[in-house]
Amino acid sequence: MANQSLNLEKVLAFQREFVRERDWDKFHTPKNLAMALAGEAGELVELFQWLTPEESSDLALDPVKAKALRHELADILFYLLRLVDKFEIDLEEALWEKLHENARKYPIELSKGSAKKYTELKDDLGK
Amino acid sequence: MANQSLNLEKVLAFQREFVRERDWDKFHTPKNLAMALAGEAGELVELFQWLTPEESSDLALDPVKAKALRHELADILFYLLRLVDKFEIDLEEALWEKLHENARKYPIELSKGSAKKYTELKDDLGK
Amino acid sequence: MANQSLNLEKVLAFQREFVRERDWDKFHTPKNLAMALAGEAGELVELFQWLTPEESSDLALDPVKAKALRHELADILFYLLRLVDKFEIDLEEALWEKLHENARKYPIELSKGSAKKYTELKDDLGK
Amino acid sequence: MANQSLNLEKVLAFQREFVRERDWDKFHTPKNLAMALAGEAGELVELFQWLTPEESSDLALDPVKAKALRHELADILFYLLRLVDKFEIDLEEALWEKLHENARKYPIELSKGSAKKYTELKDDLGK
């Protein structure tokens, strides 16, 4: 898995052509793309819903399930990238902005070992 | 938006460290990450739920909504990448595999202008 | 459709027996039931995702889609009622509590014709 | 919790009036209602996402979380009932139809103690 990267331009261009050739742009309103992403997220959840936490870590030992997982993640990313393209979002920038915000919202000393939401952490601070 | 790309290695390394410092790995089972992704997908859908298709295309004209959209997409990508990392998935490969499969499942001549699922398209072929 | 009602006791008892006979209670933790409900909600969304608002109103004209819709709603209700049963929630009370809260949060004069969230309506009041 | 029931007619009538008074019917297309339900399902999942299976069973010991749970279930039911009303579905009939179908799809002898989907159970039968 060394050196993972994602050539977004190439993917976005492929998607645009894929949609254009099929005259699907009329279906790809942002509203519909958000719904489609949520539908795929539902399918992702279905893969894990009856598993224990431990079994969920071993899901990919089953090659059929491993493939299904890759496909669901790809489907989610497909619609996410369509939204990115529609709204001309700089995805790398948006992601780093959020990563840094998360680091601020969840200071290590307060959030260590805790699954509390940042809104609850603030209450802790006030104590 | 020219030349979008995503240095995944750097993001994955940041995420790993972010999680390690907070001792959150115990929360980040694949099952929980899938749930968290679905929760964020629900928040994405909420941004669009009462909008007409046209209004959904103009969502980013409102800077508050535009920021919320960027954040939701980043949150979804955050959990997607955590899953990718946990399962050591080659995301670019998985995405292209799915893009090519979609192209096969939805031949242009059959799917042009139609929102039918590929399972329904097969029925059309049989006619 | 006159006189719709729902004999919950009978449904809950059937579900309990259904689960007991199959030794499925180990799978039916609240966490898993919430996931299963979200998965079914994803399937519901898929029924509507490519439709225009107008087409969505006519979905049930297609008997296959009408049946799929009834099934998705029943599946969602199935898991909702399992959660209700697990936590011994008085569903009718919980529902009316929320209906009255909604009526308070969305005063007619402020929310008429507006899809704004109640948190945004408060801002309007302050103006 | 003895004798749970749900007077749907009264709820549906309240909802209709609630929506009419606020002139919200234009927002309540089936498509939008399905999205809203999925958004609420996302909030339900968020309540459980970082919990162990055991912790998820104890969620209601925390009165704040117990209330949040009741509210999320009520919100999901709210949108489910709006859809039921829009499409004039007989909910009790739809639910029992699905309960009986589930009983057929998951014969006790095949599905006992197994979380397999009915499509996988069929494969077992073929062995």
Image (cartoon, coloured by chain):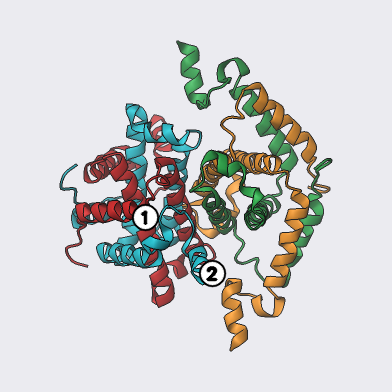
Chain colours: A green, B orange, C red, D cyan
Mark 2 crowdedness (10 Å alpha carbons): few <14, some 14-19, many ≥20: few
* Nearer the camera: disc 1 or disc 2: 2
Query: In which quarter of the view is residue B25 placed?
Result: top right
Placement of B35 over or under D99, stated as above or below:
above
Mark 1 crowdedness (10 Å alpha carbons): few <14, some 14-19, many ≥20: some
Placement of D36 over or under B86, stated as above or below:
below
Of residues D118 and D94, the one nearer the viewer is D118
Q: Residue furthest top?
A: A127
* Label 2 residue SS: loop
Asked whether residue C58 is in view, the answer is: no
Q: Chain of mark 2?
A: D
Label 1 to label 2: alpha-carbon separation: 21 Å
Give the number of the disc on residue D127.
2
Q: Tell me the quadrant of the picture where the C terminus of chain B can be found.
A: bottom right
Residue in the image at 35% along x and 49% along y: C80
Q: Chain of mark 1?
A: C
Asked whether residue C114 is in view, the answer is: yes
Residue D43 position, x and y percent, is 45, 41
Residue with the mark numbered 1: C22
Is residue D5 toward the left or the right of residue C79 in the image? left
